[in-house]
Image: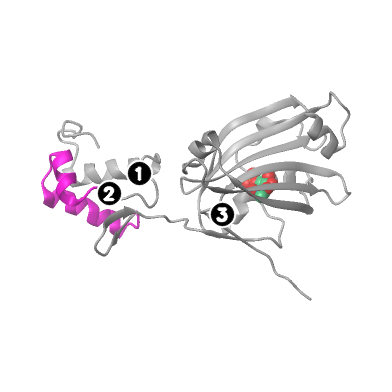
Amino acid sequence: LAPAGWFVRNGGPRYVQLRQRLVDGIEAGILTPNSSLPPERELAEITELSRVTVRRAIHDLVRDGLIEQRQGSGSFVRDRVGRVEQSLSHLTSFTEDMARRGVQTSSRWLERGMFQASTDEVEVLGLAPGDQVSRIYRLREADGKPLALERATLPLDILSNPTEITTSLYEVLAAAGRRPVRAIQKISAVNIAAREAELLRVQEGAAGLRIQRISYLSDGRIAELTRSLYRGDAYDFVAELNH
Ligand code: 16G
């Protein structure tokens, strides 16, 4: 929130400009979910606007569900995603899981291309040493909130052109008749290291869940080896148990 000066003369009412400024900050992830806004008086000082103007902008953001007021403790950026309750009984994709909740997904690409398989990938995917694989590594976000880092490795006969993936991996696989139908998933507890914590916007050392998914096509071939890091403060995994 830069002080006055950023207001555009004839750029419309000032409360609208302030409102937009706050929306931009939320969308860009500068104002993160659950973070508090400065008190109205301070906001007025910083922006050199009147308290009435500040109050009006905040009022609109509360109405639009971007900000919530908590009794006695002020205004906070609303966490619209909250904790995600994720079933472990269905083989679904991140995009599908979020679409079902009416939440928009986005990805920040960290790596996408063809690489020589590591010894570990050679072993898990049953490849020959020196074989190439498709690899996609991305930060997965829901409503702009980073939830997980996912690194997927696929044999070239499953995915030959990783740059084809712009949104959903499973959607592209399904379109090619290679949608995984079964998977083995392993979940382990970890403390999130500095580099990953920065991407996930959590404190270094925060609780995380390391998840490995190996998925299979209906003909038994391995489709994917995905190693992910999920935020521990954002996920509850739920499985149904029968006796
Ligand atoms: C899920 C899967 C991941 C898969 C991805 C595809 C876990 C825990 N989850 O996030 O293995 O690659 O969905 O999502 O591994 P997409 O179709 O939205 O790209």
Q: Is residue 171 visible?
A: no
Which residue is the site of mark 3? 98
Which residue is the site of mark 1? 31
For label 2, count other residues whose C-alpha is less than 10 Å away and answer few (under 14), some (14-19) or many (20+). Answer: some
Q: Is residue 4 above or below residue 89?
A: above
Question: Which of pointers 3 and 2 lies earlier in the amino acid sequence?
Answer: 2
Range of residues picked out in magenta: 38-66
Q: CA distance from mark 3 to mark 2?
A: 27 Å
Question: Which of pointers 1 and 2 lies earlier in the amino acid sequence?
Answer: 1
Amino acid type indicated by mark 1: Leu
Under 8 Å from ligand 1: the CB of mark 3?
Answer: no
Which residue is the site of mark 2? 37
- Marks 1/2 in contact by CB < 8 Å: the verdict is yes
Q: Is residue 31 left or right of residue 82?
A: left
Q: Residue at x 63, y 41 (%)?
A: 150
Residue 4 image position (x, y, % from top left): 16, 34
Pair 1/3: label in front: 1
